[in-house]
Image (spheres, helix red, strand yellow):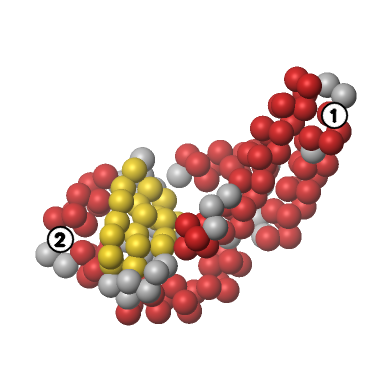
Amino acid sequence: MRLIVGYRKLLNVTETATLSELKSAYRNLMKDWHPDKFAEDAVLLQEAEEKSKKIIQAYHFLVSISTETITKTIDAYTDTINNAAIVDFEYKSEVLRVVFADDTEYEYYGVPKATYVKLVNAETPQRFARRHIFQSFVYRSTSKLAANPV
């Protein structure tokens, strides 16, 4: 969750920001921090490159968890969580990554360690996740990210 809060703070948007508000915030920040503006000063150029990478990363992340994006992809998500078996899962710093048999991957944010431990110890992890994780936490698809690393 700190990641989400940090990205929202970087782009100066609220939790309820629409895709158009995210795009506007992104464009305005990129106008200020585009590396081409700092071509004359090597130190500022380096800073602008790092800042612009963070801005791009924040924008793409926030777009992937926005309500509008979730709404557009809810049918595919519902099909995956109801029909595809969990192949693998991994937990790190309140982020649970779940890989499904249909070759999709999702990350769930803000998952407490206690919930992860219960998932590991569940008789049927699929049923536990369906009841306690899939609809309870902020999530995003990482399938495209895994196929096309940046």
Q: Position of residue 11 (x, y in %)?
A: 67, 43
Secondary structure under badge 1? loop
Q: Dot 2: few (<14), some (14–19), or many (≥20) neighbours within 10 Å?
A: few
Residue 50 lies in quadrant: top right
Give the residue drawn at x 84%, y 36%. Answer: 36
- The amino acid marked with disc number 2 is Ala
Is residue 140 visible in this depiction of the protein? no
Q: Dot 1: few (<14), some (14–19), or many (≥20) neighbours within 10 Å?
A: few
Residue 140's label in the rendered image is none
Vertical side of 18 occupied by 7: above or below: above
Q: Is residue 55 left or right of residue 132?
A: right
Vertical side of 13 occupied by 18: above or below: below
Q: Is residue 105 left or right of residue 51?
A: left
Disc 2 to disc 1, C-alpha distance: 56 Å
Residue corresponding to mark 1? 39
Residue corresponding to mark 2? 122
Q: Position of residue 135 (x, y in %)?
A: 38, 66
Secondary structure under badge 2? loop
Is residue 35 visible in this depiction of the protein? yes
Give the residue drawn at x 14%, y 55%. Answer: 121
Q: Position of residue 63 (x, y in %)?
A: 61, 57
